[in-house]
Image: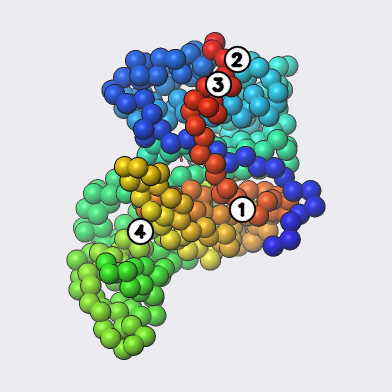
Amino acid sequence: MTRPERELEITYWLLDTRSLWPGQKIAAQAAAELQLISPEERQACTRKYHIADARMSLASALLKRLFVSKTLGIPWTQVRYGRKRDPTHGKPCALLPDGSQAPIEFNVSHQNGLVALVGSSSPEAELGVDIVHTNERLQSTYKLIDREGLDGWVDIYEDIFSDEECWDMKYNVDPFPLLDGTVVTAEMLGRHDRVCRRGQPIFATLPSGEKRSFSSDLLIDAKLRKFYVYWCFKEAYIKLDGEALLAKWIKELEFKNVRAPRPGTPARCATYGSWGERVSDSEAWLKRRRLTDVRLEIQSFEEDFMIGVAAKPADRLPEYLTDFKSLHLEHDIVEFATPF
Ligand SMILES: CC(C)(COP(=O)(O)OP(=O)(O)OC[C@H]1O[C@@H](n2cnc3c(N)ncnc32)[C@H](O)[C@@H]1OP(=O)(O)O)[C@@H](O)C(=O)NCCC(=O)NCCS
């Protein structure tokens, strides 16, 4: 890929809160860090019922403040926020000391302990990020799928996804591995790619002609993974745009050429989890027209996370849209911050 002449600089930060602030009460565990955020942010954090949510809320407040303070070159405690367009539901933005909107762009997402920020010092950039976790509420998802089938489950979201997207999620499957690592493609499945129930005995015909039997649970998991890619792109684009819950066009926003990236490896006692595959060639369409100005990318992290980014303008973006750098709480954030 040739690099654009005036390529935008984009910041991609990730803060993993899963091993931060252990215990049950954020106020006790993160007393020092809570002094680094505003009284309103602190209150929002300590009000969370689950400490896991409080951790992500604190991490998000720290990441945003770090980005805005560094990018605008203003003191840590003087960072202020507003919202674009709608004062209640609009996209969060930074404010200049005179109260006007700062000419920078950022967006945040949190899920299952991970917090991501994408940002740019350029006012032309429009960015949206979303993290999905494929094990999120998995048992209740399975329960619903066992009752309604995967097709019935996808239909629950028919107000969000177009007919073509629903079809793709129900009946098309990306290559997925069997338990021994053999990768099964849609072609090997024949019409078994239409299966929407778990617990069915199905088989794939390998290139050698050998038939391999396995449970449709694996097929359904692969289809679910693809569902989360659609979800992630939709959220990332909605967050780029900032219209959020007020967007009336969600169903007319379509994604094509969607494929789930292969997972990374899980975190083990002595190592962090690893990044998996990147998928960068999916397309965004709105009201049947391709949004040529938007680029999308999704990357797997560990086995169950995927992080998606939607960005504009397409002709000024760097090669990768998910070039995340893991920040260290103490060295990268606390040492830079000043208490309120
Ligand atoms: C706020 C919203 C945009 C994202 O929420 P989410 O996916 O549940 O949560 P995420 O962790 O990914 O994002 C939360 C962050 O989004 C940011 N955000 C809030 N409102 C936003 C908006 N209007 N536009 C962009 N970003 C927004 C905030 O920075 C927030 O983090 P913070 O509170 O720590 O600052 C969401 O509530 C929403 O409106 N979603 C779209 C509606 C929908 O129907 N989605 C269905 C499937 S696509």
Image coloring type = rainbow
Please determine whether, in this image, residue 93 is positioned above or below residue 274. above
| Residue 247 appears in the rendering | no
Foreground mark, 4 or 3, reads 3
- Mark 4–mark 1 CB contact (< 8 Å): no
The residue tagged 3 is 335
Q: Earlier in the sequence, mark 4 or mark 1?
A: 4
Sooner in the amino-acid sequence: mark 1 or mark 3: 1
**Which amino acid is tagged 4?**
Leu
**Quadrant housing the N terminus:** bottom right
At label 1, the amino acid type is Tyr
Name the image quarter holding residue 186.
bottom left
Residue 320 numbered tag: 1
Q: SS of the residue at dot 1?
A: loop
The answer to whether the residues at label 3 and label 2 have Cβ atoms under 8 Å apart is: no
Decide: few, some or many residues near mark 3? Use Cα within 10 Å; few <14, some 14-19, many ≥20.
few
Indicate which disc, 4 or 2, sits on the residue closer to the N terminus: 2
Q: Are marks 1 and 3 in contact (CB under 8 Å)?
A: no
Q: Which residue is depicted at the point 49% across and 44% down?
A: 130
Lower sequence index among marks 2 and 1: 2
CA separation in Å, label 3 and label 2: 14 Å
- For the C terminus, the image quarter is top right
Q: Earlier in the sequence, mark 3 or mark 2?
A: 2
Residue 317: x and y, percent? 69, 50
Q: CA distance from mark 1 to mark 3?
A: 29 Å
Which three-letter amino acid code belongs to the residue tagged 2?
A: Thr
Q: Amino acid at mark 3?
A: Glu
